[in-house]
Image: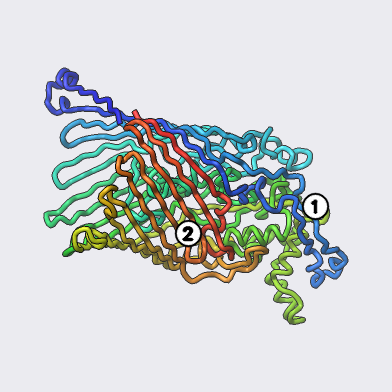
């Protein structure tokens, strides 16, 4: 890596005549990188352009309501085609972006230094239909000639400027020091001063705080959320989210005591995780939903998170204890009233839905989609019309709770119907364009809940026979306990699930030399265990519905996954082969092979693949990602 170093000794003497400023030096390095990802797995089923229900025949379930009103018994339950007017698309290039970074390191005195990273990122959409969705800031939702807002309601009932789709959180900014446009962003992921004086160290400014060391898993690494706009969760696993972790304005410091134990603490501004933009190639939220992110963020944007960690050694064990009081960055979700205003009376204003030609179009699609996202398709309908914010408007619109009505009907004539049958009938009545409203969009709130996380870490280094596999083998444990953690209810109720959660990861890692001709191989193996949610934070009670048709989930009692990684440099250190594997014990797997080629200091080529698979059952973490298989490459030039 080529460095440019400027020394300001003469200027320091002129300005102050002092030796301190004369020590000031500045080092500037940089990188330009082209990043590309080629899709090999098919269309993203979270989007309207990749939905498996476009043009698909689905069963009309309206006559299930004949037990409530006999007139519905005359309606045919023959199959019908839904959304046959939507063009299905399978994009080739899901990422094509240029990145430039400048790293500036400054040393002012023997005690004071500074660091700044300036990052620019520009996305070049390879598909025209992405341009209305695959964006950073809010500008994409204003493209009224591309997005279908003006034609959704006949006669322009809501006016030409009414936006009913997702707006980007905080204008699309991931951190406080960021400027975003429709297809680019410029930010300062690092801008801070470091002060060292004996046992005292302080860092002030915009910074990342990474306490955990696990591959794939975030256990002790709970300080900051993730920015998933650029490449979702599919980046290089060995980099441990270093490019995704959201920096925050913070004060951080540590003090080392005479017994070599160290106390570290921080206070930082809350910043939420940023999900891939809805409707884009990596989106994780079904496009038939609008998520109101701003109300929750406005309520919590001035929150300050705190944390402390006490670390030291007991015998041969490295030990640390931590506590984090934070506003949870990932958030939880619940139904929201559509925010279309009083002029929208007659189109379900005040309910959790509104007509939208790109919305959910059939009961079969609803049941499949809800289950795929780990929701309960029956109770989500219940709560969308019976919870207090919606009850009055739902009653006016003629909606009813399938669970409550099934209870009444079966109370008079046991075995007559089920909540599932009534839910499917009611949904198809809503979705019917002549009897109901046609395809519907759902509206959600995203909330950020306060929590306290208690953690403990331990490491032990085995001292085996020289050159044996156990020599220098590192055994590690990270564990956290969070009392009264809030989870999204699979019913999307206003009432969250609140439970204590225990999370742990056990790891083995080492460098081992298998051959005298090759450098040492790095190997790591891990096991993660969670008691209440999966790796993505979804409550386990939403697992286990039918893979093909959806339905009421059976739930799981715990989450377990294992990870394995190996890195093998070649003798000339120009090549390095990587392999990372993540396996959910319920049957989902991510395999990421890769190779790095660096023939000289200023150039590097990386080539990786993400291979995802699920065995079905809506009970593993890869089920909602498995169409996102890809090959991705990075071409980097350093200066």
The location of residue 598, given as percent across then percent down, is: 36, 36
Residue appearing at x 82%, y 56% in the figure: 435
**Would you identify the image quadrant in which residue 400 lies?**
bottom right
Does residue 542 appear left or right of residue 86 in this picture? left
Residue appearing at x 76%, y 52% in the figure: 82
Near-viewer residue (287 or 568): 568
Near-viewer residue (223 or 93): 93
Q: Nearer the viewer, mark 1 or mark 2?
A: 2
- Depicted 7 relative to depicted 209: above or below: above
| Residue holding disc 2 | 537
Identify the secondary structure beneath mark 2: loop
Badge 1: few (under 14), some or many (20 or more) residues near its Cα, within 10 Å? few
Placement of the N terminus among the 4 image quadrants = top left
The location of residue 269, given as percent across then percent down, is: 38, 45
| Residue holding disc 1 | 433
The location of residue 637, given as percent across then percent down, is: 39, 30
Determine the CA span between mark 1 and mark 2. Answer: 37 Å
Name which of mark 1 and mark 2 comes first in the sequence. 1
- Depicted 526 relative to depicted 89: above or below: below
Badge 2: few (under 14), some or many (20 or more) residues near its Cα, within 10 Å? some
Tag count: 2
Does residue 461 appear left or right of residue 272 in this picture? left
Can residue 482 be seen at all in this image of the molecule?
Answer: no
Can residue 284 be seen at all in this image of the molecule?
Answer: yes
**Would you identify the image quadrant in which residue 602 lies?**
top left
The location of residue 444, given as percent across then percent down, is: 59, 53
> Which numbered tag is attached to residue 101?
none
């Amino acid at each position: 890596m080529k460095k440019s170093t400027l020394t300001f000794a003469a200027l320091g003497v002129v300005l102050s005549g002092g030796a301190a400023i004369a020590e000031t030096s500045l080092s500037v390095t940089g990188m330009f990188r082209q990043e590309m990802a080629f899709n090999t797995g098919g269309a993203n089923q979270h989007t309207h352009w990749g939905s498996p229900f476009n043009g698909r025949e689905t069963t009309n379930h309206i006559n299930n309501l004949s037990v409530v009103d006999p007139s519905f018994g005359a309606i045919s339950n023959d199959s019908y085609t839904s959304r046959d007017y939507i063009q299905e698309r399978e994009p080739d290039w899901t990422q094509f972006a240029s990145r430039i970074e400048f790293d500036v390191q400054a040393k002012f005195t023997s005690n004071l230094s500074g660091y700044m990273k300036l990052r620019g990122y520009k996305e070049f959409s390879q598909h025209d239909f992405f341009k209305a969705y695959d964006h950073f800031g809010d500008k994409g939702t204003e493209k009224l000639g591309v997005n279908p807002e003006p034609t959704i309601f006949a006669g322009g009932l809501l006016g030409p400027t009414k936006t009913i789709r997702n707006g980007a959180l905080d204008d699309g900014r991931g951190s406080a020091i960021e400027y975003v446009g429709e297809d680019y962003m410029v930010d300062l992921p690092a801008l801070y001063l470091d002060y060292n004086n004996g046992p005292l160290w302080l860092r002030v400014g915009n910074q990342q705080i990474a306490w955990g060391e696990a591959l794939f898993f975030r256990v002790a690494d709970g300080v900051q959320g993730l920015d998933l706009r650029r490449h979702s969760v599919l980046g290089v696993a060995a980099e441990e989210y270093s490019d995704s972790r959201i920096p925050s304005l913070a004060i951080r410091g540590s003090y080392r005591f005479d017994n070599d134990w160290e106390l570290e603490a921080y206070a930082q501004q809350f910043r939420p995780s940023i999900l891939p933009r809805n409707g884009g190639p990596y989106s994780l939220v079904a496009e038939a939903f609008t998520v109101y992110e701003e109300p929750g963020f406005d309520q919590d944007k001035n929150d300050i998170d705190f944390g402390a960690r006490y670390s030291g050694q007991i015998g041969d064990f490295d030990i640390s204890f931590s506590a984090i009081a934070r506003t949870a960055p990932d958030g939880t979700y619940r139904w929201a009233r559509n925010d279309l205003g009083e002029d929208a009376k007659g189109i379900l204003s005040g309910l959790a839905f509104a007509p939208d030609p790109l919305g959910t179009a059939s009961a079969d699609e609803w049941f499949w989609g809800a289950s795929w996202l780990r929701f309960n398709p029956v109770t989500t309908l219940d709560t969308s019309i019976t919870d207090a914010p919606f009850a009055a408007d739902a009653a006016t619109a003629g909606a009813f709770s399938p669970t409550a009505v099934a209870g009444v009907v079966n109370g008079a004539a046991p075995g007559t119907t089920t909540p599932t049958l009534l839910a499917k009938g009611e949904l198809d009545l809503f979705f019917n364009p002549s009897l109901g409203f046609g395809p519907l969009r759902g509206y959600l709130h995203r909330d950020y809940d306060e929590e306290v996380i208690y953690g403990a870490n331990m490491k032990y280094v085995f001292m085996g026979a020289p050159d044996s596999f156990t020599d220098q083998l590192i055994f590690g444990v990270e564990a956290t306990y969070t009392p009264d953690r809030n989870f999204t209810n699979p019913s999307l109720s206003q009432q969250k699930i609140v439970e204590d959660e225990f999370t742990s990861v056990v790891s083995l890692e080492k460098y081992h030399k298998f051959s005298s001709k090759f450098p040492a191989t790095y190997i790591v193996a891990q096991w993660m265990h969670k008691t209440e949610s999966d790796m993505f934070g979804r409550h386990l009670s939403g697992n286990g519905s039918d893979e093909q048709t959806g339905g009421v989930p059976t739930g799981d009692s715990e989450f377990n996954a294992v990870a394995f990684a190996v890195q093998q440099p070649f003798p000339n250190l120009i090549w390095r082969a990587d392999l990372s594997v993540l396996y959910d014990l319920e049957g989902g797997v991510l395999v990421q092979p890769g190779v790095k080629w660096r023939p000289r200091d200023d150039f590097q080529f990386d080539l990786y693949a993400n291979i995802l698979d699920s065995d079905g059952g809506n009970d593993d973490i890869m089920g909602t990602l498995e169409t996102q298989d890809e090959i991705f490459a990075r071409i980097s030039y350093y200066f």
